[in-house]
Image (tube, rainbow, N blue to C red):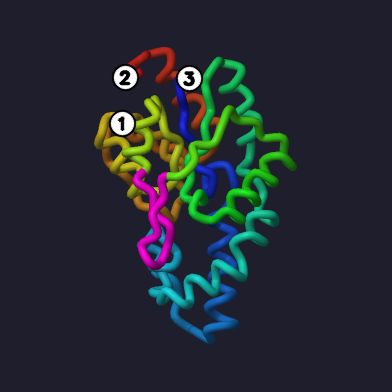
Amino acid sequence: MKIAIDFDGVILDWEKHIRAYGELYSMDVLKSQTPRNKQVFDMHSGYNWDVKTILDFAKKYYVPVTHSAPPLPLCKEMLDRLKKDGHTLLILTARNGYPQMVEAAKEVMKKHNIIVDGWIEGGVVFNGVNWIMDKAAICAKNNIDVMIEDSPDHAKKISAIGIPVVFLRDKTTPTVNHNLVYDVDNWTEVYRVIKRLATNNSKI
């Protein structure tokens, strides 16, 4: 199968670390006592930051946190198993809008010997605040069989076009109710689900 894999929150333990720095930035730089709205997946929206604040935070922390945050436990080991099983592994991430972020991600993967078959490039549009990506359209265009994703919004849209999503969700992330969304919380579960999908050949 051809498997697309998000980077932040899927390969890299990004969310927990960037949220910690978001709280630090809110407290020390913005002098805010207002906690993040944990019902919102996007951290910036959770703090209700304006564009200038988002860009300042990104400039200060995105690349350093990329290098300081570790990969998720057993990510490399399970990716190696997926490759051994014959699957094609491709990175699909909105980092494509930030060349320095792509470079940092590739450096992290090299450092931890995380091996994939390629990187789906492009596909991002700047909306005035962030680079956004229509991952569902990109998955369809690239004949992706399964997506490994941590964003509920992307999980909804990708599953809606008939592509299974292994939804690597932490406890603060909203659930997604769809028969093609497989809710997991670790990489061993990711591997089990994909192995089952490949064996059952349910859609794929």
* Nearest to N terminus: mark 1 or mark 2: 1
**Residue lying at 37% horizontally and 42% vertically, measured from the top left:** 135
- Element class at badge 3: helix
**Res. 180 mark:** 1
**Residue lying at 44% horizontally and 41% vertically, measured from the top left:** 149
**Res. 195 mark:** 3
Q: Are marks 1 and 2 in contact (CB under 8 Å)?
A: yes
* Nearest to N terminus: mark 3 or mark 1: 1
Q: Amino acid at mark 3?
A: Lys
Q: Which residues are magenta?
A: 123-134
Q: Amino acid at mark 1?
A: Leu
Residue highlighted by disc 2: 203
Q: How far apart, in angstroms, are the residues tagged by discs 1 and 2?
A: 9 Å
Residue 201, compared with residue 49, is above or below; it is above
Q: Examine the image and state in which quarter residue 44 appears.
A: bottom left
Q: Examine the image and state in which quarter residue 18 appears.
A: bottom right
Measuring from the top left, give residue 79's x and y in whole percent: 59, 29
- Element class at badge 1: loop
**Residue lying at 30% horizontally and 43% vertically, measured from the top left:** 156
Residue 153, compared with residue 59, is above or below; it is above
Q: Examine the image and state in which quarter residue 118 appears.
A: top right
